[in-house]
Amino acid sequence: MTDQPGTPDPTTPPPEPDVAPVEEAVRAGYDFTGPALELGALMLDAQTQSSARVRIPLAMLNRHGLVAGATGTGKTKTLQLLAEQLSAHGVPVFAADIKGDLSGLATPGEGGAKIEARAVSVGQEWAATGFPVELYALGGEGTGIPLRVTMSSFGPTLLSKVLSLNDTQESSLGLVFHYADKAGLPLLDLADLRAVVGHLVSDVGKAELKALGGLSSATAGVILRELIAFQDQGADAFFGEPEFASSDLLEVTPQGQGLISLVELPQLQDRPAIFSTFLMWLLADLFHDLPEVGDVDRPKLVFFFDEAHLLFRDASKAFLDQIAQTVRLIRSKGVGVFFVTQAPTDVPDDVLAQLGSRVQHQLRAHTPKDAKALKATVSTYPTSEYDDLGEVITSLGIGEAVVTVMDERGAPTPVAWTRLRAPESLMAPSDPTAMQALVQASARHATYAAVVDRESAREILAAKLEEGARKKEAETQAEEAERARQEAEKAAAKSAGKAPAKKQEEGSIVHDVVSSGAFKDFMRTAAREVARGIFGTARK
């Protein structure tokens, strides 16, 4: 008996279930052979999740990356997730802790129904885990170990960015640093630089100012006023000694975990330029000190640059070129850099083009400006299997992101709508008392906590000024003595019989006055007051 039309043949195996093109592409594109960081699982749509895994090859993390998204969409948790896994793979991490939440990395996380549900959905074996953390604070403003940098190391280019100087003023500031180097005037803190500029615009330093050629007294005056305002904001706490050694960021614990170094940024809204520019100095210092290593199996350090838009805002072309060059070349030193910001358009094209990994959280398109930014964001991604990637980005939930990374060959992976894993450390600030104890117990606290105040430009110039005052005092004494001698001779000529005694008497009076301790104390006090008037409050 033949089968009725339409009846399936029992000997024929059932057809394979349909596999969405995006799922097929993601499974193949993220199937790496080497170690990788696990980001999460593929979402087929807002409700449907696949078991396909989305990952980043460990060896590609020195090709840099971007974590972007609107406020409240989960950028900080993504940064935390990446930091945890990097540490577990023995890779040190540096990050700016803007809101204080990242201190939770030191404390095992708190489980719960939501965490367990997410872990199961993305195939994660979640376990509460704490990680090795070192806390720093710029200039000691906060709980952490003080981070300082000398003014000479910071340099005129970065300082010009902080002071919002124009190109002419930046060039002039460079001449001031050059003069200080040639004159043997160490620039350690902000007061040193103020002293040098103040010296150059003073009557004493006018000849040296003129010899610099490209530095006018008017421009030097502008720079001096900006430095005074900068110091009034409390920025002098960031400059000085002991200077932080960036090599301290490269530590791996005896247990094989990478050290996570977090720097507190209190009152970011008041001084955004100094914070972002200090982080740029730290990155440039790493570039200067580290040897070339080429392509490595794992990075020596991954550097997370949070609130990256602050670095690029109102920056000069020369400054942007320096950033782009540093990012491009530091890869060969084994350092990966991730910029964390709200939108990819916050990052200049020359820098954005060098970022191999993208984790894009939700963007909003409520205004024409938002819509334009969304369109620009979509244009930075490779061709995807999604009909409308912009719609995907605006419909992402919290803890979801659109991801593309570099595969092990250096080619971009398929764009993947990803539900991200949950961090295993505390997703909130750690206990302040525990953090204070952690800082006090650190060996680096003893190295960096106490300020070192050695002789530098301010003291040297003050000593020169006081020496000049002493010289002037000696000249004045000599003139007074000569005047007294002449008066005595005149008196002797009028009264020849009593001249010797009178001359001796008058000479004795002058000698007694100028040699007295009270007269010398008066002249030294006057010299110090002159020094204070030019160089600011004297050190105690």
Image (cartoon, grey):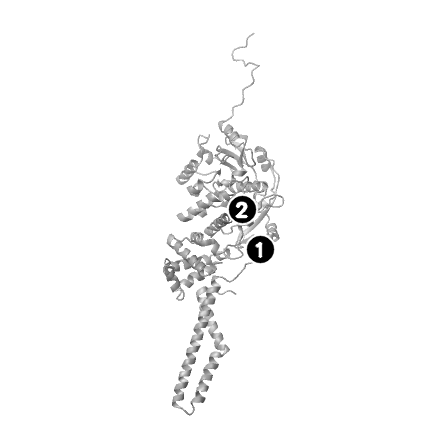
**Callout 2 touching callout 1 (CB < 8 Å):** no
Per the image, the residue denoted by label 1 is: 447
Point out the tag, 2 or 1, that comes first from the N-terminus: 2
Residue 40 image offset from top left, x and y in percent = 54, 35
SS at mark 2 in the image: strand
Q: Residue at x 42, y 76 (%)?
A: 476
Q: Would you place residue 240 above or below residue 102 in this image? A: below
Q: Nearer the viewer, residue 255 or 108?
A: 255
Q: Which residue is farthest right? A: 255
Residue 171 image offset from top left, x and y in percent = 39, 54
Amino acid type of the residue that numbered disc 1 sits on in the rendered structure: Thr
Per the image, the residue denoted by label 2 is: 94
Is residue 121 shown to the viewer in this render? Answer: yes
Residue 169 image offset from top left, x and y in percent = 39, 55
Q: Nearer the viewer, residue 483 or 217?
A: 483
Total labels: the figure holds 2
Residue 386 located left or right of residue 51: left
Q: Nearer the viewer, residue 314 or 487?
A: 487
The N terminus: image quadrant: top right
SS at mark 1 in the image: helix
Q: Would you place residue 364 above or below residue 436 in this image? A: above
**Mark 2 → mark 1, Cα distance in angstroms:** 19 Å
Using a 10 Å C-alpha cutoff, classify the residue at mark 2 as few (fewer than 14 neighbours), some (14 to 19) or many (20 or more). Answer: many
Q: Would you place residue 67 above or below residue 195 in this image? A: above
Amino acid type of the residue that numbered disc 2 sits on in the rendered structure: Phe
